[in-house]
Image: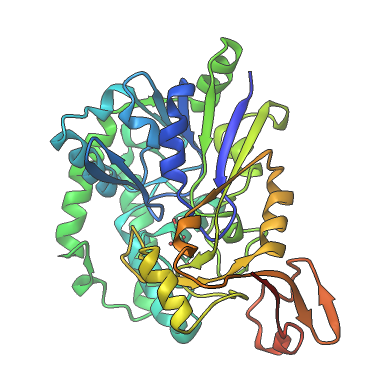
Amino acid sequence: MKVDVLLGLQWGDEGKGKIVDVLTPKYDIIARFQGGPNAGHTIEFEGNKFILHTIPSGIFNKNTTNVIGNGVIIDPFILQKELNNLKVKNIDPSANLLVSKKAHLILPTHRLLDAAYEQAMGKGKIGSTLKGIGPTYTDKIARKGLRVGDLTSGKFAEKYESLKSKHLEILRFHEFDYENHKLDGVLFGEYEGKWFEAAETLKKLEHIDSEYFINRALESGKKILAEGAQGSLLDIEFGSYPFVTSSNTITAGVCSGLGISPKKVGKVYGIFKAYCTRVGSGPFPTELENEEGQKLRDVGREFGSTTGRPRRCGWLDLPALNYAIMLNGVDELLMMKADVLSPFDSIKVCTAYKCGDEICEESCYDVATDDVELDTIFDECIYEES
Ligand code: IMP
């Protein structure tokens, strides 16, 4: 057996959660392989609306095992809120939720660092969801991070304090008033207490060596779907850097985020919307900063499910879509929200970019960068209208 993959081909918010929910009955295991609570997968289930940030979208099916893989980063506080929301509706997620021991933890100070860095960048800010994603992956790569397995190591408090003190030093250097900064409506000190309570909940979930679990499950004939978060154009390598997230959002991320060989990747489902949206800063060649953009936002109800921010809207960008298809090796394309275009008399799709005297059909470096110096290179989009 192989691991099938479902992921977004644009800047996120393509409607992945809904499709995973439909596909779930076909799979024994749904696994998240990257990202963290910057994701917001909206699912309507028995008349209730749920937004999942960390938990895989197979959680509503009692027969599905849900795995939070090693490539995911977890904020215990946000995870606990998700678990509580599910319990209120009589869904007991702990019964079919497994967590990788190697998944890294988002500490309260990671969230403070995110806020401090964004504040320091002023106009050049990334537009982060401020969930601590960048700082947590930074510590992972810098080999300083804390993992789920550390929670039960007996030395967690010590390790936590050591990393926290390094973070506080940086915050002081940035003159960031962390003591008076609110996280989820409460001051840092109080939030930290809640975070530790939530860490106790996370401790009680089943922790696994997810790479062995996944590979053994494949050997025993289980069907597995890897659920992507964010979108391909936010990938740390191939997205519009630096306005990207800090993980590999593309198919390649499944191998490192779950511990499977590239030979074990099966069918790749690529999801895109019939138009484009983007939250946060960064290049967006087909963006409509006019009434048409507002109409797309209103009809498509384009507001962030994690932050509530209005999404930037624009026409479908085919060179960018082709780029994402190439990077991911997409086998099946799923187009979402075509009905949002119904109220429009005519619609456009971008087929190429005009870069100086050149016509460029690829999502090259010059188009996908916000470097002012390079603005002379990308001029405008070339559209087909119907
Ligand atoms: P971060 O991952 O929170 O640091 O955010 C980095 C960039 O990715 C920002 O522009 C965010 O708006 C964007 N982003 C992160 N997660 C999502 C998502 O799930 N959907 C859409 N955009 C996202």
Along the line of sight, which residue is nearer the eye, 245 or 150?
245
Which residue is rendered at x = 19% and y = 74% of the image?
A: 180
Query: Is 324 on the left or on the right of 202, as rendered?
Result: right
Quadrant assignment, res 310:
bottom left
Please tell me whether residue 162 is drawn above or below residue 22 in the rendered image.
Answer: below
Question: Who's the residue at 47% across and 61% down the image?
Answer: 134
Q: Quadrant of residue 142?
A: bottom right
Q: Tell whether 339 sits left or right of 155.
A: right
Residue at 36 percent of width and 63 percent of height: 304
Residue at the far right in the pictured view = 357
Residue sitting nearer the eye, 351 or 90: 351
At which x and y percent is residue 120? 43, 81
Applied colour scheme? rainbow
| Residue 332 x %, y % | 64, 39
Residue furthest to the top in view is 220
Residue occupying image coordinates x 25% and y 45%: 49
| Residue 123 or residue 346, whichever sits in front | 346
Residue 139 visible from this viewpoint? no
Q: Quadrant of the N terminus?
A: top right
Circle count: 0
- Judging depth in this view, the residue of 265 and 149 nearest the camera is 265
Whether 158 is drawn above or below 344: the answer is above
Q: Quadrant of the C terminus?
A: bottom right
Image spot of residue 276 (x, y percent):
54, 65
Residue 287 in picture, x, y percent from top left: 55, 76
Quick check: 386 above or below 61? Answer: below
Viewer can see residue 33: yes
